[in-house]
Image (tube, rainbow, N blue to C red):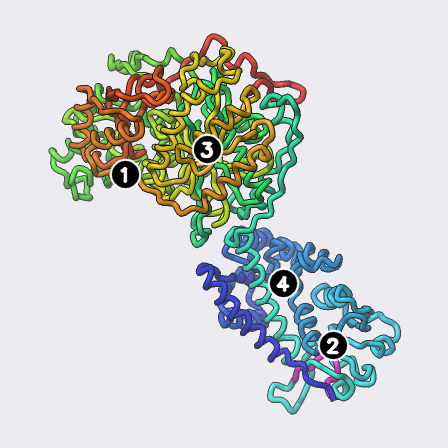
Amino acid sequence: MAKVLSGKDASADIRAKLKEEIESIQGKYPDFKPCLAIVQVGGREDSNVYIKMKLKAAAEVGIKADHIKIPRTASQNEVVKEVERLNNDSSVHGIIVQLPLDSDNEIDSNLVTNTVLQCKDVDGLHLNNAGRLAHGDLQSCILPCTPRGCLDLINRTGIEIKGKKAVVLGRSKIVGAPVADLLLWNHATVTQCHSRTVDLKAEVQNADILVVAIGKPELVKGDWIKPGCVVIDCGINSIPDASKKSGTRLVGDVEYSSAKEVASWITPVPGGVGPMTVAMLLQNTVEQAKRAVEQSGASGTWHLTYLPLHLKVPVPSDIDIAQSQTPKDIDLLAKEINLLPEEVDLYGKKKAKVSLKVIDRLKQQANGRYVVVTGITPTPLGEGKSTTTIGLAQALGSCLHKNVFACVRQPSQGPTFGIKGGAAGGGYSQVIPMEEFNLHLTGDIHAITAANNLLAAAIEARMFHEGTQTDEALFKRLVPEKNGKREFCKIQFRRLKKLGITKENPNDLTAEEIKKFVRLDIDAATITWQRVMDTNDRFLRKITIGQGPQEKGRTRETQFDIAVASEIMAVLALTTSLHDMRERLGAMVVASSKAGDPVTADDLGVSGALAVLMKDAIRPNLMQTLEGTPVFVHAGPFANIAHGNSSILADMIALKLVGEKGFVVTEAGFGADIGMEKFFNIKCRYSGLVPSAVVLVATVRALKMHGGGPTVTAGVPLPKPYTEENLELLGAGCCNLAKQIENANKFGVSVVVAVNAFGTDTLSELELVQQKAKEAGAFDAVICQHFAEGGAGAAKLADAVDRATQQPSNFRFLYDVTLPIEEKIKIIATQIYGADDIELQPMAQEQIERYKRQGFNDLPICMAKTHLSLSHDPTLKGCPINFTLPIREARASIGAGFIYPLVGTMSTMPGLPTRPCFFDIDIDPDTEEIVGLS
């Protein structure tokens, strides 16, 4: 007598374990919620019964099940679109299409089921899943529910499948064929039979394991079955039975009464395979939800493939190195770092925009370790911060096998075609493709240019119209009557609120209120908003506008700035969300009224349009290094009149993606006294992110310059003292290194010095820098060769950074923002630059007082001074003392959120030199390769 193999009991056991597993995972990931979508076309009653059963079972174990009802009238295209919508919904982990499709139109059910993503096909019907099962690739496929249930029941008998003779009756793609494949890949010897098989009884009598799914009531009799056989009956058939109230009863494909006398185990009908099908549907859904958690990055596991470097000596040009490497397609890189397809918008094959929704999806994920790369006071040649940032990221990835992101600024095209060249790093530590990095990228700077110039046009237009119309005429045009009704638009309520007017009906405003509402009364002498373009053009530094006859003589002197000097660029870099960016854009102050009140983009009614122009630019750009590690390129504000750091949003997303044990390496512009100080006091203040370590880049040549070496000039060969060993000169210049280490330590963050080695440096010189750095309080100091060797040349630096970031962070700000503006300036000047005091010149004093009256005192300070000295005088090298810092002006970027005092004159529109970089830049018309970029 056979033992009854109850699918009802087995499925209850499976469901109980699933419920326990879901609750356990939710303890670690509270947002974990497996979701199953059931798509039904039409309303067949039998389908409704099956779906109701699945919905109930899902709810019992903690799976969210959505029943998607599509009307019978739907076309095939409409059904496919609904499935594609579910494919793109990251909250949905499993999709099943209830068959048969009950439609008035002809619909290819195979097309619909194969539209379901292979990774969401929890029915296991997709061709990819079937093909992988047929090939024995059981780890990468989703097993069909009924066959998987059959295998589970067989395993519950305790019989060893390996070596047994298994016979499968039936060859349907839903049960027969996949069951045969499963038994085969579990090492049974499988015979698959069907309705055309000759002498079916003889074949069945050989079976140690018999699975029947042939659709014929009670076909298999007891005398067909080998004694001791395990019988799995997948059939369910209705036959007449007068003794039943319904007049019918359910039977399987096996005659149960005779078979149970011979078999060792047998499944009943009903209560056998049927409940297991639903249980396995739930099991598949939970497994895909768990896989989604892993792939989403919540598990912290990346599956990154590194690109090998083929080093050459001497090191070729940057563009030759970049073009000799074949980058990964960016969609592959995105998948490797656990970005979901719907979070990535491709811009060609090598760059992409990444959605801000990643932050919300991974909000439970702990942040990785946050490292900022800065430098000593540089020579005009730069000391390799960008190269070090990329080299360190490559080393952390390819050498230490850590999850790592580099976050860097997007370069302006001004320097690219001017004198400096590009900013993709250098040598074997670069962002690639470097041509796309340096030219246009995804158009963010063009979006900033468009938004900036729209605001500039709005200022001039408003002054023109206010100067040529009465209050009543202005009001009628600003609040036009539509369909007999006059209404304020959404943005106008912001101005009403600012004016203290609570009325919502335009017709209720008094004449005085109308005047206040329509008259911005801009004082042209106070306009601080300039037009911009992303080209170095010295002849736009001062221009006259309004000379056309239709402007009625309203001329005004103004200027163009380079695009990256726009406050909108600083807003982009400091924003933390789309909502935050919208508010910051509205808060930008463009001028003062004649009464001394600030005039904002909101007052002009243009801030919503600015946000629309910036809606794509707010998303970080994904690229890669020469060794295939990910890079975010996003925002590129000036490092003098702005804070000189890449975007907060890029850092926030990267810190979530790398996970708790990963690293985000970002760069701060200019030396530590400028870029690093602003990174801490401005960027970290607005982001709330806590830095883990500082990497301070130093070079022998810069330290020799600070020790009293000859002038270093871009484009001119270095004088002999820089190319020959001179320990005395070097030692004298290490005072600058010591001061910058001291500056970093003031913020409570460990400092690792990266000694960026050049071919002319001697070992004695490099080791002296190491010694001086450690004596000055650095956590460690490491000689680096990443320019010539890529990640391998920064492996020791990566190890030191790994150790430094394991130290507890005692991060603190330098000042309290509620202190008076002049006191905050003095703290930076005395503690970071080493000044004795500050001197506020009359214009600066007047401006600071105005900002206080306007309510802007409690903003952080963004000092605009030379990067070539710790002082205001670029000729004073080393560690100057006994000086007073003169503050010429104090300007405000209210939308970005800082006051920027000017120490000396700052050019915001570079000019082209006698021989600009564009002389060397060209394109090969045959290969379309760009040449001459540097």
Residue denoted by label 2: 159
Q: Nearer the viewer, mark 4 or mark 2?
A: 2
Mark 3 and mark 1: Cα distance apart in space? 50 Å
Mark 4 and mark 1: Cα distance apart in space? 50 Å
Amino acid of disc 1? Ile
For marks 4 and 2 on the same chain, the one whose residue lies earlier in the sequence: 4
In the foreground, 389 or 406: 389
User: Which quarter of the rendered picture does the C terminus lie within?
Assistant: top right
Relative to residue 832, is residue 418 depicted above or below?
A: above
Q: Is residue 223 magenta?
A: no
For marks 3 and 1 on the same chain, the one whose residue lies earlier in the sequence: 1
- Picture quarter containing residue 15? bottom right
In the foreground, 571 or 111: 571
Position of 506 with respect to 74 (left or right) is: left
Q: Nearer the viewer, mark 3 or mark 1?
A: 3
For marks 3 and 4 on the same chain, the one whose residue lies earlier in the sequence: 4
For marks 1 and 2 on the same chain, the one whose residue lies earlier in the sequence: 2
Residue depicted at x 66% and y 75%: 273
Under tag 1, what secondary structure? helix
